[in-house]
Amino acid sequence: MGAGVLAVVYGLLSAATWGGGDFAGGLAARRAAVPWVLLIGQLCGLMLLVLLALLRGEPALTLSAIGWAAAAGAFGSLGLAMLYSGLATGRAALVAPTSAVISASLPVLYTAYSAGLPGPLKLLGFALAL
């Protein structure tokens, strides 16, 4: 299997996983308080990551890496809290695409700022994707 095919397969699996997780989180937030949904979800993810790191024999994290991971986790949790709150209100048709566009746009805008604008074909691809 070629690298291009693997990229497409991994991309589709990633989209299905993220979409399924967001759907399940929004559904859970309708039945329980958003902070509890976040806490349980984040703890499950943390346990899985620690288990995988131990199984792979990954080296211990530096203090700097732990700080960056904590900051990323805090901002990610804040974003998920907003998404789940919006989904729990029943406005998924508005909340889900808005969240997706913002989530996709921020890394593209940061990269354009820090590394310069991509070529015209890539810009067209970004515009079509968004």
Image (tube, grey):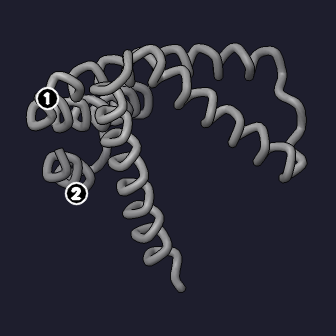
> In the rendered structure, which amino acid carries the disc numbered 2?
Leu
Label 1 close to label 2 by CB (< 8 Å): no
Q: Quadrant of the N terminus?
A: bottom right
Residue 90: percent from the left, percent from the top? 13, 29
**Residue drawn 22% across the image and 47% down it:** 126
**Residue drawn 10% across the image and 31% down it:** 94
Residue 7: percent from the left, percent from the top? 46, 67
Structural distance between the alpha carbons of marks 1 and 2: 37 Å
Residue 99: percent from the left, percent from the top? 24, 30
- According to the image, label 2 marks what residue? 121
Quadrant for residue 78, please give it. top left
> In the rendered structure, which amino acid carries the disc numbered 1?
Gly
Q: Which residue occupies the foreground of this view, 58 or 42?
A: 42
Position of 87 with respect to 75 (left or right) is left
| Label 2 element class | helix
Position of 18 with respect to 6 (left or right) is left
Quadrant for residue 8, please give it. bottom left
Q: Which residue occupies the foreground of this view, 99 or 90?
A: 90
- According to the image, label 1 marks what residue? 90
